[in-house]
């Protein structure tokens, strides 16, 4: 009897070995639950998103800073140029990439599984051509050196601007110049103007450069998106839902807390809060309802706009042939999001 021993518990007498076994079983059960929970989280493959220093994409970073992704493995990978982002996406280094609509068409031409899962914004003045102060207008660009990144967007913007004054690409000297190198080249007089956006545009304008053309003059023609392959809705369904829900929560935070949101985003972009707010005024961020409408193909004007862009790119040899926009638009995820 002495070897067994007893303890009193709630008026009952239990062998201490039985009680120890019960406690050990409980601890083991808790440990198993923790392991299962951990394994469930770890089993989610990372969702990697390529982006760049464009103000319209800042809500991705804001959502992360505000903790809206939680423990979901969402990774935002920043690249210096559009060329690098596209290369990373084509090579499978990332599952998604930010891309302007003209770049989407270019990618989709060789990858028909490309889908637009989020329409980020319409550029409404945030992209454009910035020139030396003595260059008063687009006509004055004739014979001048214009720096632009090696992407269809740069060529598209320059072409559209020149078209408005009866000029063409043959009337200017184009200089390949990626976005990070534009400020230095401009200040060293290596170019007379640049096709630019983001912090370089803000900084150049703040230092006295002149905006002679911007996307407010071609409304709805420069559209920014998040794209991925069609099978993401199966392979990364949970991550995608978290990402898109967090995106729209970040937009809500911007609307309700504009000063704090602008301060956070400006700091990451390396510009002042006032500079960032001015730049963001040139971007129309699209809300959930607008995304559901456009990705759901209920707005024929949007589809017509993509067709016009496709025609333009084909006529100017950016594309080999026109692309049907309908397969590109995927509302499978946004239509089920509830905030």
Image (spheres, grey):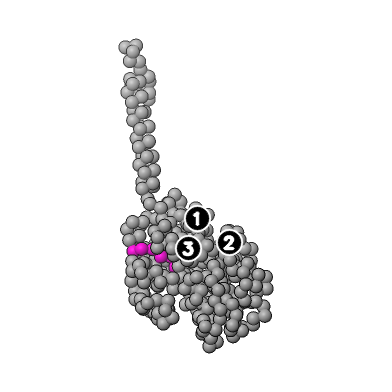
Q: CA distance from mark 1 to mark 2?
A: 15 Å
Q: Residues within 10 Å of mark 2 (few under 14, many from 20)?
A: some
Looking at the image, tell me whether mark 3 or mark 2 is earlier in sequence order: 3
Q: Which residues are magenta?
A: 225-230
Q: Nearer the viewer, mark 3 or mark 1?
A: 3
Tell me the chief SS of the magenta region: strand
- Look at the image and say whether residue 62 sits in the magenta stretch: no
In the drawing, does residue 104 fall left or right of residue 204? left
Q: Which residue is painted at 32% across and 12% down in the image?
A: 1
Relative to 262, residue 45 above or below = above
Residue tagged 2: 269
Element type at mark 2: helix
Q: Residue 86's image quarter?
A: bottom left
- Check whether the beta carbons of the residues at disc 3 and disc 1 lie within 8 A of each other: no
Relative to 166, residue 152 above or below = above
Element type at mark 1: helix
Q: CA distance from mark 3 to mark 2?
A: 19 Å
Q: Which residue is painted at 46% across and 63% down in the image?
A: 85
Q: Residues within 10 Å of mark 3 (few under 14, many from 20)?
A: some
Mark carried by residue 64: 1
Looking at the image, tell me whether mark 1 or mark 2 is earlier in sequence order: 1
- Check whether the beta carbons of the residues at disc 3 and disc 2 lie within 8 A of each other: no
In the drawing, does residue 146 fall left or right of residue 4? right
Q: CA distance from mark 3 to mark 1?
A: 23 Å
Element type at mark 3: helix
- Percent from the top left, x then y, of residue 190? 62, 72
- Percent from the top left, x then y, of residue 135? 64, 81
Residue tagged 3: 84
Q: Residue furthest top?
A: 2
Whether residue 270 is visible to the viewer of this picture, yes or no, is: yes
Q: Which residue is painted at 62% across and 69% down in the image?
A: 185
């Amino acid at each position: 009897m002495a070897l067994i021993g007893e303890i009193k518990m709630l008026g009952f007498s239990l062998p201490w070995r039985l009680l120890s076994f019960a406690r050990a079983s409980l601890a083991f059960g808790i440990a198993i639950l923790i392991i299962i929970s951990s394994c469930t989280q770890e089993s989610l493959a990372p969702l990697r998103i390529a982006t760049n220093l464009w103000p319209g994409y800042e809500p991705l970073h804001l959502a992360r800073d505000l903790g809206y992704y939680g423990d979901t493995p969402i990774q935002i990978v920043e690249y210096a140029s559009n060329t690098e982002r596209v290369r990373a996406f084509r090579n499978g280094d990332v599952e998604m990439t930010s891309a302007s609509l003209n770049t989407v068409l270019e990618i989709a031409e060789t990858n028909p599984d490309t889908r637009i899962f989020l329409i980020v914004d319409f550029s409404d003045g945030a992209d454009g051509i910035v020139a030396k102060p003595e260059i008063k207008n687009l006509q004055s660009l004739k014979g001048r050196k214009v720096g632009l990144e090696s992407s269809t967007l740069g060529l598209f913007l320059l072409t559209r601007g020149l078209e408005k004054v009866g000029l063409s690409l043959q009337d200017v000297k184009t200089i390949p110049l990626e976005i990070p190198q534009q400020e230095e080249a401009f200040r060293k007089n290596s170019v007379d103007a640049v096709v630019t956006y983001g912090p370089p545009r803000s900084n150049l304008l703040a230092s006295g450069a002149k905006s002679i053309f911007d996307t407010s003059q071609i409304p709805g023609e420069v559209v920014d998106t998040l794209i991925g392959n069609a099978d993401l809705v199966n392979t990364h369904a949970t991550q995608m839902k978290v990402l898109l829900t967090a995106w729209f929560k970040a937009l809500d935070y911007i609307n309700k807390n504009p000063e704090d949101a602008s301060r956070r985003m400006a700091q990451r972009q390396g510009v002042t809060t006032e500079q960032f707010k001015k730049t963001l005024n040139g971007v129309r961020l699209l809300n959930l309802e607008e995304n559901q409408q456009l990705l759901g193909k209920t707005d024929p004007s949007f589809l017509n706009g993509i067709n016009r862009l496709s025609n333009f790119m084909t006529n100017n040899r950016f594309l080999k042939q026109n692309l049907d926009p309908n397969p590109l638009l995927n509302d499978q995820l946004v239509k089920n999001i509830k905030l």
